[in-house]
Image: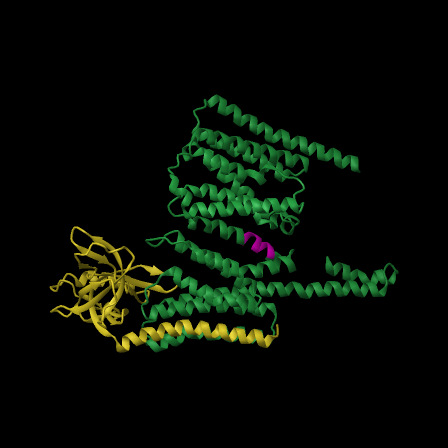
Chain colours: A yellow, B green
Amino acid sequence: MKAIYIFLLFVVVVLAQIFVPARMIYDQENVIATGTAYKFKTQPVDPSDPFKGKYIRLNYDVNSAPSNDTTWIPSAPIYITLTTDEAGFAMVKAISKEVPGDLDYLELKANWYNAYEKRVEFSLPFDEFYMNETKAYDAEVAHANAQRDSVPNNTYALVYVLNGRAVLDNVFINEVPIGDYVEKR
Amino acid sequence: MKSKIIDELPELVKNQVISEEIALRIRNFYQSQQSDAPGKLFTVFGVLGALLVGLGIILILAHNWDDFSRSLKTFLAFLPLIIGQFLVGYAILKKKSSTWKEASGTFLFFAVGGSIALVSQIYNIPGDLSAYVLIWIVLCLPLIYLLKSHSVAILHTVFSTFYACSLGYGFNAAPQVPWLYLLLMVLMLPHYVHLLKQHPQANMTSIFNWLVPLSVIITLGAFLERNGDLGYLMYVILFGLFYSVGKIPAFHTQKLRRNGYLIFGSFGTIILLLITSFNGIWDFKMDAAVFTSREFYITSFLFCLSSGLLVYLYRKQWLKRTNLFHFVFIIFTVVFFSGLANGVMATIAVNVLVLALGLITIKIGTDQFHFGILNYGLLIITALIVCRFFDTDMSYIIRGFLFVSVGIGFFFTNYVMLKKKKSILKSNN
């Protein structure tokens, strides 16, 4: 094959290689720009990823919703609509198996149905917050220390929600971004 | 050596041992070889350099420079990708050497993975490792053919294996079957076949002769889910298949160390038989549902493939001498399913099978005067005895005698063969 044809095929590959990360960026930016911001109470711990670097894994307080329906299938898609409590933190308004008409909903996967407590258990997917490698462990310690003051849980994740998608923007301890909070200590 | 011959050339021409023309041809021959050798070395270093730089960039970016703004970090995520693409594009357009293509292709491979990883990091996109690796591999797959790059093909195979393992062996909560691995390997196959046809003797080809079966061996277990016990049978049949593949002339005519299929097939068979020679293994809990399971279908498919290849080898008369190794997978299949009912009989049958394989290997070794094969046979029998050492109630004296006699057997057979070889050499002289 002539070099020019190979090159043209390569251009197609180049476009695909650029398209994938560019599309990822576009999707995320779109949610941040037009979505609604929610604060999810959370607790960070510190693992790492070989390619992406250090992150803190976030365990959210929102992890189940009441339901009398017992036919929830593990790993099947579920939809939760969101609202805020009096303190301004996110809470589940309703849970369903169909896409709700509401804009502020999340598409998740059911873990299992807790028949005893009559609750559907799930995990929020935006549970990885990437941090500078020197700060990730400190962040976990900072959270543990901040727990000791008067407010019960003062660590939350700021998440933008739009049409089932969610983008984790930042994590705050006592209203200070966790990266800055760690630096100040 | 070469320079010595070239230095001697004027002397040889002067004394009319060779003509001027022949001297010139000898000189040209060595010069062309010399210009080829450093090229290969360059390629190896070029690829290694690109590999290290690519991995280094991923690590540097993974540090997470949180002082930088989001847009600057995004720019940095694309920078290595654009540089890699520019280099590869340049290599294609300017028809650069294979060194250029291999090195730039390797760099671009890592730049693609790096850029996706970094975007995930910047936007905190939760990572499903296998999905991420899959996108990475697919985006780089065309490079194998556009650049005719062996190093990208190797990376493709390694990362496909990694993908299959991370998906199938359940590092995550729920393991899934990595069917796409099969497709990824099939898409790489034309490159490998081309290599086998065009450069059967090249070192690169023998790397693939080892890498491809190794990848399949590692991955096969990822297709098992509930009926893990069928795995023993599956692997014995797979090793039978590899043994037969190793007998195809394209591989069999090569040196043994280039024939990964034959060696994996033979070693794998022996190791699995040794494992199943323990009585404790044969207490499988299987019911009729096994026969409709995915594992059973895969096993049946492999069995048909192995038997089909064996028949094909016969038809083509590529098997000059058959030995028990060719049929182990058939015998084991029969033993396996009869063993579901009777574990003791199966244990005995497998032990006899390993013993027979050991003896036959010794026989082949002596017939061919091949010390390697002879000692491999002795090793099989030793391994069998060592295994029995652990699980029988035999008295220490009997076991002691067994070891001593096998030890003596080692010395004796090697000694006899050495003597025979010497006497044949003498008579030839």
Q: Nearer the viewer, residue A153 or B189?
A: B189
Please indicate whether residue B305 sits to the left or right of residue A52 in the image. Answer: right
Task: Please tell me which residue is depicted at 54% across the width and 62% down the height of the picture.
Answer: B151
Residue A167 falls in which quadrant of the image?
bottom left
Q: Quadrant of the N terminus of chain A?
A: bottom right
At 50% across and 33% down in the image, what residue appears?
A: B350
Residue B254 versus residue B367 in the image, above or below:
below
Q: Is residue B363 above or below residue A130?
A: above
Q: Residue at x 36, y 64 (%)?
A: A53
Q: Is residue B40 left or right of residue B397?
A: right
Q: Determine whether, in the image, residue B312 is placed left or right of residue B330.
A: right
State the image coordinates of residue B119 (x, y, percent, origin top left). 37, 70
Residue A60 visible in the picture:
yes
Q: Position of residue A157 (x, y in %)?
A: 23, 67
Q: What is the magenta segment's predominant secondary structure?
A: helix
- Which residues fall within the magenta stretch? B205-211
Q: How many marks?
A: 0
**In the rendered structure, does residue B257 fall within the stretch colored magenta?**
no
> Could you say which quadrant of the image residue B227 lies in?
top left
Between B194 and A97, the one nearer to me in the picture = A97
Residue B146 placement: quadrant: bottom right
Nearer-the-camera pick, B269 or B183 = B183
Q: Is residue B345 left or right of residue B45?
A: left
Residue B89 appears in the rendering? no
Percent coordinates x, y for residue B130 in the rendering? 39, 59
Identify whether B348 is placed above or below B141. above
**Quarter that holds the C terminus of chain A:** bottom left
Residues A120 and B290: in front is B290
Residue A98, percent from left and from top: 25, 65
